[in-house]
Image: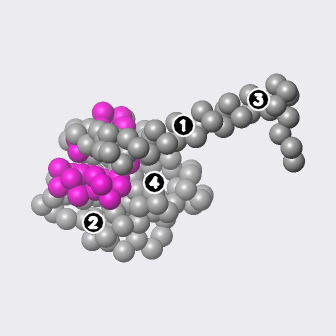
Amino acid sequence: MVFNTKDPCARILVLIVVVLVLLLLQYNKSKLEGGYRPNVSRMISGGSKGEVVKLTSDNAEQIKNSGPVIVKFFAPWCGHCIRMADTWKELAKNSPSGVTVAEVDMTTDADVAKIFGLDVKGFPTIIMFHPEKGAIKHEDERTVSNFKSFINKCLNS
């Protein structure tokens, strides 16, 4: 195929490709030079009230040791996980004070389960972690009120 330099559509397409390549190179350069920095303090604190914290191998150890955290281990292709997404966001908005609501995409961050000392086999898997009490698995109905009861039970037992 021959590139027609007089075709305005072809010129625009080339311009878009050049801009995208330059942006990608700039992003990679800043990442390699250490210019890209995730907001770790926000990750450690669990984010703002109402936010679900995304756990990765970079922040999992800090979150695990920072206080009580309830974690959903999920896969994006899992039907149960997809149906539960809004419930999990609602839980984050209404979670008891001091409890972090987090989730791990096991298709991209499976090593996080090892950080928590788990061998996750099915999805979704819900675990409450307490620095002093360890891990407690949730095996009941997946509703906001049920999750809140589970959290309170874990904190008060």
Percent across and percent down for residue 29 are 41, 44
Q: What element carries label 1?
A: helix
* Mark 4 vs 2, N-terminal side: 2
Q: Where is residue 13 in the image (x, y as percent from the top left)?
A: 74, 33
Relative image position of residue 86 (x, y in whole percent): 50, 42
Answer with left or right where residue 68 lies relative to residue 122. Answer: left
Q: Which of marks 1 and 4 is nearer the N terminus?
A: 1
Amino acid type assigned to the residue bearing label 2 in the image = Phe
Q: In which quarter of the image is residue 141?
A: bottom left
Query: What is the distance, in whole Å, between disc 1 and disc 2 at their CAs?
Result: 39 Å
Mark 3 residue type: Arg
Q: Distance between the residues labelled 3 and 2?
A: 52 Å
- Taking depth in this image into account, of 111 and 19 the one nearest to the observer is 19
Q: Which of marks 3 and 4 is nearer the N terminus?
A: 3
- Judging by the rendered image, the residue that carries numbered circle 3 is 11
Nearest to viewer (mark 1 / mark 2): 1
Residue shown at the point (22%, 39%) measured from the top left: 41
Give the residue type that dot 1 points to. Answer: Leu
Residue at 55% from the left image edge and 56% from the top image edge: 76
Q: Mark 2 points at which residue?
A: 116
Q: Residue furthest left?
A: 132
On-image quarter of the C terminus: bottom left
Q: What whole-number distance in Å separates the C-alpha atoms at marks 3 and 4?
A: 53 Å
> For residue 22, which numbered disc appears in the image?
1
- Residue 91 visible to the viewer: no
From the image, state whether disc 1 or disc 4 is nearer to you: 1
Name the residue tied to disc 4. Answer: 142
When asked about the image quadrant of residue 46, the answer is: top left
- Which residue is rendered at x = 34% and y = 63% of the image? 112
